[in-house]
Structures are given as C-alpha cells and as structure tokens.
C-alpha cells in the first residue's frame, strides 16, 4: 500500500474521532506550503506537517537518522555527522530501488508520529499538510497551492543548492499539476509577491474560521 495512502487513512480515522473541521493542504515542492502552514500556525491553528515530521526523524540520533545511516552509510553525512539532505536526495533519486529503500525506512515512522500528534491537537480546527495523498479526500475542505514551474525550479536551486536538472527531476517525480487541482476545494496560485500570497491566505482563513 502506498505510504501516502496509509497516512491519509490514518488521518481520516483521526478526523472521525476528533469530529473537528479539518483542512487538507497540499502542493508541489517549492510552491509555498511552508509559508502557508507558518501563516496558519501564527493564527493559532495546529498543523500536522508530514515534511516537518520527516525532517525531525532525520535529526542526529533519531530513529530515521540511525536507519538511514545503516542503509546508505556515512556517505549521506556532513562534517558534523548530520544527514546531508541534499546528498540523500541525490542518492534516493539516482534509482528506483534506492528511493524505495528510503521510503520503506521513513514512511512507517512518519505514520506513527502523525498518529501521536493527532492526540495533541488543541486548536478548534486543524490542518494536515503533505506533498501528496491518494483517493478522494474526506477533509472538510482541501486547499491546493501551486506555483509556476520556473519559480519552483528557481526556489529549489536557491534553497537546496541543487542544479536545474535535479530540480526538474524532483518536480517530475511528484503528483502532476492536473492531479493536484482535481482534489481542490480551494486553490492558490503563488505567482506574485509574498504580500499577495498572504492576502490570499487571509481570505481563506476567514472562510475556514466561519466554517469551523
């Protein structure tokens, strides 16, 4: 079973237990998901972010870190013996088998951590943010964020110090634009200034507050 489908099923079960208004937030890499979740967090909304969970589990000494080093060796570490996420990404995208090996390490750990986090939700409504999921969504609403491909490539290269070839390969491995927007109740194209993006987020926040 694809990991994103497992995460989604767990999330739906948690939502039914909690019975709260929930927003599913997704978008491609470097489209502004983190800016969006930071915006909602500043408003007091609890966010369960699959990417943040993954980064936490890859910190030195955590379970993900130990298993990754065991699988891929010291090649993925920097001089401080922390995981070099750029190097790990390069290795994972070099072959399907290596990518699958990384997913088999990380996905069960992420799944368990997400389930625990739902027990700690305290805001009146919550957000689940993830790069992808499968199946028709059962969230109260779904917000999809996208950006022009050229902007994505530029942000990936600047943020992660990747070259354009790898940036395009990463984008191509993700869910397509058409597939993402097929899930959308709400949609933001992040193609202008940060101020404009936050204005759009404020608009949707007011809607979600009224519906929660």
Image (cartoon, helix red, strand yellow):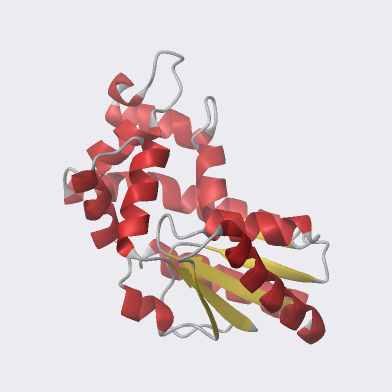
Q: Quadrant of residue 117?
A: bottom right
Instruction: Please provide percent x and percent y for residue 43.
Output: 79, 61
At x 29%, y 38%, the residue is 162
**Vertically, is 60 above or below 154?**
above
**Vertically, is 72 above or below 208?**
above
Q: Quadrant of residue 23?
A: bottom right
Q: Is residue 120 visible?
A: no
Q: Nearer the viewer, residue 45 or 19?
A: 45
At x 77%, y 61%, the residue is 121
At x 44%, y 53%, the residue is 107
Q: Is residue 33 visible?
A: yes
At x 67%, y 77%, the residue is 204
Q: Nearer the viewer, residue 200 or 161?
A: 200
Q: Nearer the viewer, residue 72 or 191?
A: 191
Instruction: Please provide percent x and percent y for residue 127.
Output: 66, 67
In the image, taking residue 145 as reference, residue 37 lies left or right, namely right
Q: Nearer the viewer, residue 119 or 40?
A: 40
């Amino acid at each position: 079973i694809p990991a994103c489908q497992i995460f989604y099923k767990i999330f739906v079960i948690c939502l039914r237990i909690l019975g709260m208004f929930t927003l599913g937030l997704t978008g491609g890499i470097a489209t502004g998901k983190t800016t969006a979740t930071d915006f909602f967090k500043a408003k007091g909304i609890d966010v369960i972010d699959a990417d943040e969970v993954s980064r936490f589990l890859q910190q030195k000494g955590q379970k993900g870190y130990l298993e990754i080093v065991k699988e891929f060796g010291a090649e993925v570490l920097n001089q401080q013996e922390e995981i070099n996420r750029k190097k790990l990404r390069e290795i994972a995208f070099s072959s399907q088998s290596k990518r699958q090996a990384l997913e088999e390490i990380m996905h069960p750990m992420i799944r368990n951590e997400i389930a625990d986090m739902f027990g700690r939700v305290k805001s009146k409504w919550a957000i689940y943010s993830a790069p992808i999921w499968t199946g028709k969504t059962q969230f109260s609403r779904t917000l999809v964020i996208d950006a022009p491909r050229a902007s994505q490539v530029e942000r990936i290269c600047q943020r992660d110090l990747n070259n354009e070839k790898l940036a395009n390969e990463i984008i191509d491995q993700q869910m397509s634009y058409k597939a993402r927007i097929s899930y959308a109740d709400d949609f933001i194209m992040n193609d202008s200034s940060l101020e404009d993006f936050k204005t759009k987020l404020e608009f949707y926040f007011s809607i979600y507050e009224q519906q929660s």
